[in-house]
Amino acid sequence: MKLFVTACILSWVASSSVAISRDLYVDPSQGNDRADGLSSAVEAGSGPVATIRRAVQMAEPGDVIRIVEGIDRVYEQVLFAEKSGTKEEPIVFDGQGAIIDGSVPIVREEWELVSEGLYRSTVIPEKYCYGVNPAYVGRFFFVWEGEINRMGRSLKGPKEPYMSPEELSPGQWTYVEGEAAFYLRIEPDITLEEAPVRVPKIVSGVQISGECHNLIIRNVTVTHVINDGFALTTGSNKQSTVENIRFENIVAKECGDDGLSAHGDCEVYVDGFLSIANSTGYCSQGVSINRNVRMEEIHGVEIFPIGGRHEFINTTVVGHAAQPVTVLASAPFETSELILENCLILAAPGRKPVDARMRIQKGGVLRADRLSTQGISIQVSGLMELSNSVIAGGREVTLNILEGAEWEGSNNLYDIGLFLLEGTRFAPRDFSTFSTAAHEEGSSVRPISALGEASSQSELSLSVGADLSRLP
């Protein structure tokens, strides 16, 4: 009996030790990848590791990888490839406020002097654009005095024509396709080494790749990466899944493509996300639920679901982009469904409704409740359901329901200039006729003050439009 009890105790201790989670610390300046990672400071027999890569290799279910508190910037990707926790014990990466910076200083040897202040490089597109890959050339930018300089171009947004090298002023750059070369111009009285210029090197700041389940990423900012701030993909194996990936309190700023992007059979949960000055705010496939999101200064498209089902709850968009919302399906998905619940989407000052459109394409579905929009036209080719919402902006705003589209509306309030239903035009005074033809119920038209202002909130019923008190 004694031996049996002792064996049970040893078995219990062994099984319990597996469940003990660890904090693994990363300190790029003071750490050592030969250390155990169990202490945030170098101590006898213990200390932080130097790289995130090493900490991820060491991590087991239940472990928390922490950037040492007080570290401002880390010039390394966070990569989880074929790495998983469990539902009960996920693996956590906690940036503790650190910034993942994808840029590196400009290297003089990679550039040739063309004329006073003008430099040319064929090394940059070969080295950082993966052998002059057009997709990466299209994403490329320079970091000038700490800020992104796109020269009016991005992969999914507007593309200003490349300037000729001779046209460049100090602080500008261009690309000459026939030469596969970047040019940049600096002030003539400084050397290239002294110029406040950096180039993006890291592809994506946080990359989830292949069969990955039960991961939490929190308290981290990503900036100046060539591609996406936070990127997820199932990889080359079509049977792979990415499940239960959670992001908490994250920021993507000035990234070459998407703030957050998922491709393939991905399951993503977000709570607290600021996407600012990226090419695209959010572009994803799979399934996602996103809460407390804010997007602003986006260049191409703010919310861009391209397959699967995606929810945005308590979200604010300040629409600088050419298209604040686009819903379409791309392979392998046949449909793309977007749910907007208690969301506010405003055109940025100076944006005209003809240039700022919500587009629901064929195969796309938009279901919105308690949505408020200001200065943004809507074009529907797929299916749209709108309820308890406010669509405002005055006479330049248009609601266009194209032939073959499906529309359901109820208890909405409009202040727009034109309703179109399969090519037939209806002025606001003809709204009752439009409502009958479009099967819109319980809705009305009247002037509304600018959304977001206290006056407009006091004018509106508490049951219509976004509740600003719940927005980030």
Image: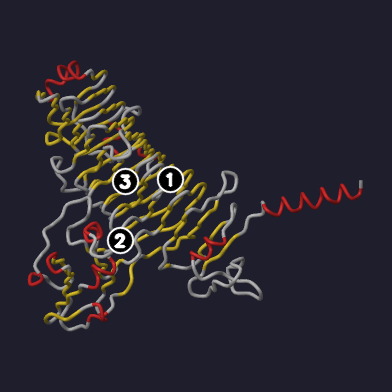
Q: Which residue is mark 2?
A: 226
Which amino acid type is shown beneath numbered disc 3?
Cys
Going by the numbered disc 2, the residue's amino acid type is Ile
154 displayed left or right of 76 = left
Do the CB atoms of the residues marked 2 and 3 lie less than 8 Å apart? no
Which residue is identified by label 3?
Answer: 283
Q: Work out whether 31 lies above or below 3.
A: below
Q: In the structure shown, which secondary structural element does the residue marked by tag 2 occupy?
A: loop
User: Element type at marker 1?
Assistant: strand
User: Residue 157 location, x and y as percent?
Assistant: 20, 51
Residue 113 appears in the picture as rendered? yes
- For disc 2, the neighbor class at 10 Å (few under 14, some 14 to 19, many from 20) is many
**Residue at which label 1 appears:** 270
Q: Write down the quadrant of residue 190 in the picture.
A: bottom left
Secondary structure of the residue carrying tag 3 is strand
Q: Are marks 1 and 2 in contact (CB under 8 Å)?
A: no
